Amino acid sequence: MLNAVSKHTGTSDRPQHTLTGLTISGNLVSITWADGGESAFHGIWLRDNCPTGLHPSTRERQWDWSEFDPAIRPLSGQIDKSGLLELSWPDGHLSRHDGAWLRRHRYDGAGKAERKPQLRIWDAGIAEDLPDCDANAVLTDDQALLDMLIKVRDTGFALVRGMPRRDKACEHVAHRIAFTRETNFGIGFDVISKPDPNNQAYTHDALLGHTDLPNREMPPGVQFLHCLEFQAQGGESTLIDGFHCAEQLRAADPDAFELLTRVPIAHRFHDGEWDVRWRAPAIALDDDGGYHEIRYNPGVGAPFDVRPAEMTGLYRALGLLAARIKDPANVLAFKLRPGDMMVFNNRRVLHGRQAFDPNTGPRRLQGCYVDLDEWHSRIRVLTGENLLD
Ligand SMILES: [Fe+2]
C-alpha cells in the first residue's frame, strides 16, 4: 500500500522526472519527459509558480494574481546543465523549475489521474475481503497506521480488531492521527440506549444507513465506533458505500442523479440547547465528476425548501437513492465483537444497525471523529509528501 502513495514523492533522479526538451508555442510551454511523455504548461502558471518568489521560510507566495498578464509567455527557454527548466521572461526575470516538481504538479489528464487515489468501490460482497487492521500494530507502528489511513481513504472504511476494551480507547487511536472533532454531542460519545434520547442512535431501534450530522456545514470526516460490550441479541452493524449507490443511480437515471448533485436538501438537529441547520445536495462531485461526498440522513431531514418545480423530482430521486441504500446487495452487515472498531469515512460510507433487544444484554459502543483534512495530512506526513513543495 505504501507504494501507492510513495509514487508522489519521487526525486529528479527518476527517469520519468528528467526533462529532455521543450518547445514554446503561443503562451504554452511543452516539455518532454525522459519516458517519452509530454506535458504542457501555461506561461502564466510557470511565472506564478517560480520558486524564487516564495518566502524562503514559510514557502508562501509573496505576490498576488494582479501582477502578471494572464497571456504572459517566456521569451526563451532551455534545459540547463543541472536539468532544470530555465525560462527567461520579458521583465528580465529568470525562472528555474525542477523536473520532479513539474511532474508532481502537472495538470494534464495523466498528471491528475496519477495523483488521484484509486477508490475501491464495493457492495455487500466485500464481506469476503474485509479491510481488517490489527489494533496493536496501528497503535505502535507508523507503517500499520498508514495502512489503516489508506484503507479508509480508498475503501472508505477499515475494521480494527483487538482494541483494548478501555474507556476512550477509540480516542487513543484517533490521537495517533490528529486532534478529534468536537460536536454538540461532545468529543467522544457513548452509543447506548438511553431514556429520553435526543438522537435515534441512543435508542435500541434499527437505524437505516445514514451519514452523521449532514445538518452541519462541514459534517465530521472519519468516524470511529469502538465496541466495548455486546451481549444483546440483534444489533448487527451495517455499512453501505454511498459512492457505489450514487454510481448505480448515475447509470440508471442520470436526471435523478443530476438533481441530487444540485438541489440542496435541508437537515436540522435541534434540542433544548442547539439548533444546527444546513442545506446541501445529497451528492457532491469534484471538478472531474468524481465523488466528493454523500449527505444522507432522513432522520434529521428538515422540510425541504427547494424550488416548487423541483419538489416532485427531488422526492423521486431521493426515493431511488434510498432504495439502493437499503438494497441488501449493497449492505455489508456484520456483528461487532467487543474489541472491534469500525473506522469509516462519514462523508462517503453510510452506517446503520439492526434493532436489538436491550433486555438480552448490554450493547455499548463508543465513538469519536477525526476530520478528513487531518486524515489526509497524516498520510502525507507519514509518506514524506509534506516536505516537498
Ligand atoms: Fe450515526
Image: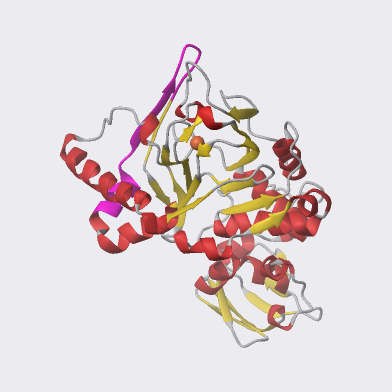
Q: Is residue 178 left or right of residue 73?
A: right
Position of the N terminus, as image quadrant, is: bottom right
> Is residue 285 on the magenta stretch?
no
- Tell me which residue sits at (55%, 35%) in the image: 232
Relative to 99, does residue 307 appear above or below in the rendering?
Answer: above
> Is residue 261 on the magenta stretch?
yes
Using the rendered view, name the quadrant where residue 151 is placed. bottom right
The image shows residue 172 at horizontal and vertical percentages of 76, 38
Q: Is residue 19 left or right of residue 295?
A: right
The residue furthest top is 272
- Tell me which residue sits at (65%, 86%) in the image: 35
Using the rendered view, name the quadrant where residue 39 is placed. bottom right
The image shows residue 261 at horizontal and vertical percentages of 34, 49
Using the rendered view, name the quadrant where residue 304 is placed. top left
Number of labels in the image equals 0
The residue segment tinted magenta is 256-276
The image shows residue 238 at horizontal and vertical percentages of 48, 47
Relative to 4, does residue 175 appear above or below in the rendering?
Answer: above
Q: Nearer the viewer, residue 377 or 82?
A: 377
Relative to 223, does residue 52 appear above or below in the rendering?
Answer: below
Relative to 108, does residue 197 appear above or below in the rendering?
Answer: above
User: Looking at the image, what colour scheme do you see?
Assistant: secondary structure
Q: Nearer the viewer, residue 238 or 318?
A: 238
- Tell me which residue sits at (38%, 59%) in the image: 329
Q: Is residue 388 visible?
A: no
Position of the C terminus, as image quadrant, is: bottom right
The image shows residue 273 at horizontal and vertical percentages of 50, 13
Q: Is residue 340 visible?
A: yes
